Amino acid sequence: MGISILELSQKAKEIYQKATIEEKRTLLDLIFSNLYLNEGKLTVFYTKPFEILANSVLATNKIFEPQFLTKKRAKSPEFAKLLARWDDFRSLRWIDSIKNVPNW
């Protein structure tokens, strides 16, 4: 389920653009618990799974934003290894990986 949520979050725009009105409504219901438009400003509330994902992305971005990196930390070999592994993780095609796993 987690992989499906992550995949949906990455492809939501593409799916939405190609969807019928009913499919768009279903997609929005999956992602948002409430949407409010007040004086031209949209306020969104995510469903629990997408709230967790959004908060995780924000937390991760704060850790890896350049202003939070000290020169010492950025130059450490451990940090360089972590960034390399993170790149591998982000660029992995997860759906292809699980297709080769028995019983999936």
Image (tube, rainbow, N blue to C red):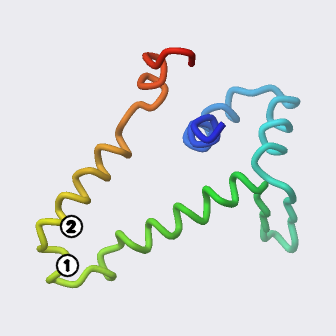
Residue 101 point in image, percent of width and height? 46, 19
**Residue 85 versus residue 9: which sits nearer the camera?**
85
Q: Counting other residues with Cα less than 10 Å from the Cα at mark 1, is it few (<14), some (14-19), or many (20 or more)? A: few
**Residue 60 position (above or below residue 92):** below
Residue 34 point in image, percent of width and height? 87, 59
Q: Residue at x 44, y 67 (%)?
A: 61
Q: Residue at x 63, y 37 (%)?
A: 8
In the visual, does 22 lie left or right of 15?
right
Q: CA distance from mark 1 to mark 2?
A: 7 Å
In the visual, does 79 lie left or right of 1?
left
**Residue 14 position (above or below residue 74):** above
- Placement of the C terminus among the 4 image quadrants: top right
Q: Counting other residues with Cα less than 10 Å from the Cα at mark 2, is it few (<14), some (14-19), or many (20 or more)? A: some
Q: Residue at x 88, y 30 (%)?
A: 22
Reading the image, the residue beneath label 1 is 73
Q: Secondary structure at mark 1?
A: helix
Q: Secondary structure at mark 2?
A: helix
In the visual, does 67 lie left or right of 95?
left
Residue 94 point in image, percent of width and height? 45, 32
Within the image, what quadrant is residue 5 found in?
Answer: top right
- Total of numbered circles in the picture? 2
Q: Residue at x 36, y 36 (%)?
A: 92
- Residue type at mark 1 is Arg
**Residue 97 position (above or below residue 100):** below
Reading the image, the residue beneath label 2 is 79
**Residue 11 versus residue 18: which sits nearer the camera?**
11
- Residue type at mark 2 is Phe
